[in-house]
Structures are given as structure tokens and as C-alpha cells.
Image (cartoon, helix red, strand yellow):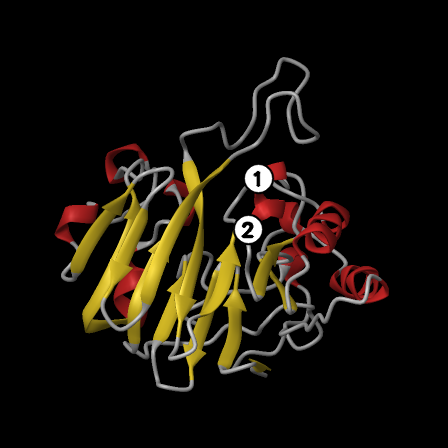
Amino acid sequence: MTVRHDDLRVTWYGYATARVESEDGTVVYTDPGRYGVLDGEWTPPGGGNPKAAAHPRATDHRPMDADLVLVTHDHHYDSEGIERVADDDATVVVYEGVDAAGIDRDVKPVDELPFEVVRIGEEDHVAVDGVGDVWSVPAYNDPDGPHADDDGSVPHPRGLGVGYRFTVGEDDTSAFWPGDSDALDAFAEIDASLFLANISGSVCMSAAEAADLAARMDPDLVVPIHYNTQSFLEADSGSFASDVARRSIPVALDESAE
């Protein structure tokens, strides 16, 4: 299923991989790849039935149609996934902290990607031809927040990654993907028509926290992603959708990408 919103079409392929396409044909992907969601090898946690899972079924997906690819941090960096989705002329925006040398997976160094690569800082704006404005914002777990250990250690310390607000299409429709982060107060100030909500909890904002953030942001549509791909990302998407809808905010689930 593809969710339609204003002049955008939004498809979730699993984990953090979302495809956003405008009516003029411009295509943006967030954090493509990992865990088999793009090569057809994903199976639900515990070996459950993929047709019954509240998650898109795995697809051997190699469209190579992206004009823009956004990478938030090391945990979501997958060079093979980027190559599956990116057009030859794509721009790949990668947070400057992403370093293949520190990743315990077989990935290419960022500077070896065969695309135009733009490194972005923690609070930067980048203009991408044919897409519009890309704005990075700090994304992290607060050491005093709900996802910190007793000693203040967190899975995503400040400086590890970013979220992205980006515009796409002739109407410059805005979207926000927070990456892996707590529901930070600064996010509530972001003006975005589409909120790609991370609802998995454990390592980032929970469904309840994401719903509270959506109420503060007041977007035109919320589409949750990054849940149920692995057991530590388990979330009740139906309850999340009900919670958001009760706040009079439009919400849609996309759990059957083909």
C-alpha cells in the first residue's frame, strides 16, 4: 500500500526505509536498507508469518529511482541499500559523523559511494537541485531521559546522528524524519506537513512519546515507520494510530509494501 498525502506518495519498506515521491516525480528515500527489508530476506521476529506481521513484507527491491537519499547515522548506514534505491544522478546526504570504519558490518566507505555525496553537520541546510531544502537537526537520547541507563549511558548520544526536515515537489511539501532519537522539545517547533514517526521505543521515542510529539507538532499527516522489524523494535501500531487520531491528527499505517 502507498499512502497519499497532498502531492506526495509515501511507502514504507521496513525498518527506517521510507520512499517519498512528489507528483512531479521527485523521489526521496530515508535510511534505505538493513535487516533484509530491501533484498527479500526479512522475516518477522520469532519466525512468525510475514503475511500477518504488522510490517511490510520483504521485497527484492532495486528501483534505482531516488533523486535524494538521506542517511541519519551509523546504525542506519547501508551502502548496498543505498545502491539499490539511488539513481545514477542521485544526491546522497550523509551525516558527517557516519564512519564505515566504526561499523561492524560490511559497508563501503561513504566516499566510495558512486553518487554525489554531501556531508551534512548537526544543524545545517543543504539545497539539492530538483528537491529543495534539506535541514539537519540534532537527534539523540537524553542522558537524563527515558531511554538512558541508570549511569546515563544511551544508545544514541548527541553527535551520533541527526534527523531531517526536507521539502519535495513543486509545492515544497515538507516532511520530517527524526531518525533514532528521543522526542526532543526542539522537534515540536519543526513545521512539517508529513511526520514520519519513529515509534519503536527501547532505543528511541516510544509510540506514546511519538504521539505526544505529533500533538505538539500538529502535522497534516503522521505515518509511523521503524517498528516491528526486530524484536527490540516491537510496537503496537494500531494503538499508536488510535492515540494520534484521538488528538484529531490524520494518521495512516503502511504495513503492506510490495
Identify which residue is drawn at 61% across, 57% down: 197
Q: What secondary structure is marked by label 2?
A: loop
Question: Residue 85 appears in which quarter of the rendering?
Answer: bottom left
Q: Is residue 171 above or below residue 227?
A: below
Identify which residue is drawn at 71% across, 74% down: 52
Find residue 145 and report its horizontal and vertical position in percent.
67, 27
Question: Residue 128 appears in which quarter of the rendering?
Answer: bottom left
Few, some or many C-alpha atoms within 10 Å of disc 1 (few <14, some 14-19, many ≥20)? few
User: What is the C-alpha distance between the residues marked 2 and 1?
Assistant: 7 Å
Q: Can residue 28 be seen by looking at this rendering?
A: yes
Q: Is residue 58 left or right of residue 23?
A: right
Identify which residue is drawn at 41% across, 49% down: 76
Question: Residue 88 appears in which quarter of the rendering?
Answer: bottom left
Mark 2–mark 1 CB contact (< 8 Å)? yes
Question: Which residue matches tag 1?
Answer: 186
Q: Is residue 14 above or below residue 31?
A: below
Question: Which residue matches tag 2?
Answer: 190
Q: Amino acid at mark 1?
A: Ala
Q: Is residue 228 left or right of residue 93?
A: right
Find residue 48 and report its horizontal and vertical position in percent.
68, 65
Q: Can residue 203 be seen by looking at this rendering?
A: no
